[in-house]
Amino acid sequence: MPRLFAGLALTVLLGGCAGATKPVDPIDALMQRYTGDVPGASLLVLKDGKPIVNRSYGLANLEDNDDVTPATNYRLASVSKQFTAAAILLLAEDGQLNLDDPVRHWLPSLPQTTSTVTLRQLLTHTGGLVDYEDLIPPGTTEQLNDNDVLRMLSATSQTYFAPGSAYRYSNTGYVLLGLVVERASGISLPLYLQQRIFSPLHMDHTLMYVRGGPDVEHRAYGYSEQDGSWTRTDQSVTSATLGDGGIYSSVEDLAKWDAALYDNRLLSAASRQLAFGAHVKVTGEPYEASYGYGYRITGDTLWHSGESIGFRNVVVRWPKQHLTVILLSNRNDPEPYHTALAIAQPYLQ
């Protein structure tokens, strides 16, 4: 057992043997809330490219009693943003767009008030565009798609601040970036990601989900705890947008994505430097971080969380130590970031 866990002094009482105890595995102790007939989690720890912890907890589908496995696919929510950013970088490498293009060059229906907002600013959440969630008409029950977001943005002249002058986390910006991928490439965002990222990396069970399209294999459904019981809360009106959070994937496939971020097999060194660069200081959040292109940067870590109704995910990378923790869950609570940090501690030099 790693030394840094020894201080936890985690024990459980052996049934029927008064006073007898045995050590509890410290990782299982940290993951205890995911254990049993409850919405669960997949956990993968990678060190030097190899899985050193690969565990599954709880259920992917409460109604059918389906166990979570390493192949279980979760809605990644905002962990998807790093893939949208990578698509933009690939298009820039191919000369199909420029990061300093005004977004209106690609999406001319946007109002004149956005005329100086660039793709680079959308990547770093510094565009100042209005949150599309705040533009949804009251009483809306039909799910929004990315073109609905574009229509709502095109109908308002409001912005939060002058482009490039501040940081504000923006799902709007990444929805628009997904639409730019489609305009620049001439194909849909799900197909572009499949052809340029998922297939080359053999992420064979990862997809950007569109209702009516291919089904999600080994799908985890999202749940929320209400009055002591679990209720399926898998979808909301904002769960069908793509560029900001539409990917389903597993810890097994995300290990392949993680490996590709260490070399030139997908993105050039220059593109990776841009993606992992600390371009702007994060504000308005309860943690210290800067923001790259789809990544938060805190100390030596590159990380991003993903939260949508019924899902809580996080991927934390320590590139200098070649260590990654991936924790995906199909429940509204707990928030997994600090759990991932605690799991990583024994493996950090």
Image (cartoon, rainbow, N blue to C red):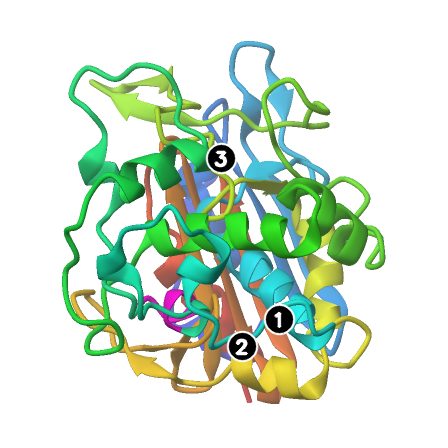
Q: Nearer the viewer, residue 148 or 244?
A: 148
Distance between the alpha carbons at the discs numbered 1 and 3: 39 Å
Foreground mark, 3 or 2, reads 2
Which of the two labelled residues, at mark 1 and mark 3, occupies the earlier sequence position? 3
Residue nearest the observer in this picture, 117 or 7: 117
Sooner in the amino-acid sequence: mark 3 or mark 2: 3
- The amino acid type found where label 1 is placed reads Leu
Question: Can you say which quadrant of the picture contains the C terminus?
Answer: bottom right
Real-space Cα distance between discs 3 and 2?
35 Å
- Of 321 and 16, nearer the camera is 321
Type of amino acid under label 2: Ala
The magenta segment is 121-125
Image spot of residue 186 (x, y percent): 70, 48
| Left or right of 72 on screen, residue 63 | left
Q: Main secondary structure of the magenta part?
A: helix
Secondary structure, mark 2, is: helix
Sequence-first disc among 1 and 2: 1
**Residue at left 75%, top 57%?**
197
Disc 3 marks which residue?
35
* Contact (Cβ within 8 Å) of mark 1 with mark 2: yes
Q: Which residue is mark 1?
A: 89
Label 1's element? helix
